[in-house]
Structures are given as structure tokens and as C-alpha cells.
Image (cartoon, helix red, strand yellow):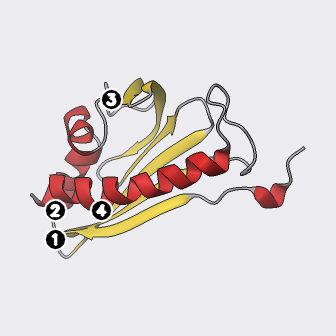
Amino acid sequence: MSEQNNQLPEIQKHLVLNAPIQKVWDAVATSEGIAEWFMPNNFEPKEGHEFYLESPFGQSPCKVTEIDEPNKLSFTWDRSGWFVTFELTEVDGKTEFTLTHGGWGNAEDVITGTGEKQGTVHDRMNNGWESIVYDALKKAVEG
């Protein structure tokens, strides 16, 4: 059995975008917006909506778990127990954006259907979110 102290931490990315909150919300909470900076999808901003992200490895099933326009969107991602949350706060005409990718298991646990350890995928995702948030999202909302 895995040890609890091997639990991987949540991945968090935070930045201030030079754009009003509604523009950032439209980028992170619409199918077209998400496709521009993240992945093709069939997202709809409705709690309970099941959708997919078209990842490089095929369709990843997701489900919207919380919508609080224009401040928060949460969804489950894949069958691995992951969740992703986008939190937005307007500050002086700019938008503070925080991404949280949680639901990680223990580093040595193998993710069902992949043969890969949680720790390996966690590191890859942490690095991936760096460029996705700090480059692609920033470009999508700031131009």
C-alpha cells in the first residue's frame, strides 16, 4: 500500500493578466476560448456538462463541477481523479488568474490505462502548464 506522505502536491500557476475579467472569463470558460490556448474541446459552461478535451493522446473525458461566472470554473479531468480549477479576480482593470490542477495520487502509483507513474505525469503536467498558462493564455487574452 502507498504511503500517505508520498502524496503529490497540487500544481498551481498564478499570473496577473492585463485584460478585464470578462475577456479572461471568455477565454477560459467557452469552448472557442479554451481551444485557442489549451485544447480542442466540446465544453459548455453548465454544471454537470460532460465534455472532452482533445489531448495529444486522444479524447480525455471531463465534467464541469462548478461555475461561478466570472470568477471560478472547476472540472474533473480524465478518469484519474484529477480536477482543474480556474479562479479569476478583477483588480484595477486587470485579472488575477490562478490555475489549480489537483487530485494527484502518490508519486509511485500507476495511472490506470497509461502504465505511467503519477510522479512522472505530475512533472510533465507541471512543465506543460508553465507554457500553457504563461505563454498561450497570456497571448490569447493580451494579444
* Image quadrant in which the C terminus is located: bottom left
For the image, the number of numbered tags is 4
Nearer to us: label 2 or label 4:
4
Q: Earlier in the sequence, mark 1 or mark 3?
A: 3
Question: Which of disc 3 and disc 4 is earlier in sequence?
Answer: 3
111 on left or right of 100: right
Viewer-side residue, 17 vs 116: 116
Instruction: Compute the Cα span from label 1 to label 4.
Output: 19 Å
- Report the residue marked by disc 2: 20
Disc 3: which residue: 43
Residue 13 in the image, given as x and y percentages of width and height? 42, 63
Verify CB contact (< 8 Å) between mark 1 and mark 3.
no
Callout 2 crowding tier (Cα within 10 Å): few <14, some 14–19, many ≥20: some
Look at the numbered disc 2 and give the secondary structure of its residue. loop
How far apart in space, not on screen, are marks 2 and 4 (Cα)?
Answer: 17 Å
The amino acid type of the residue labelled 4 equals: Tyr
- Residue position marked by numbered label 4 in the rendering: 134
Closest to the observer, 83 or 134? 134
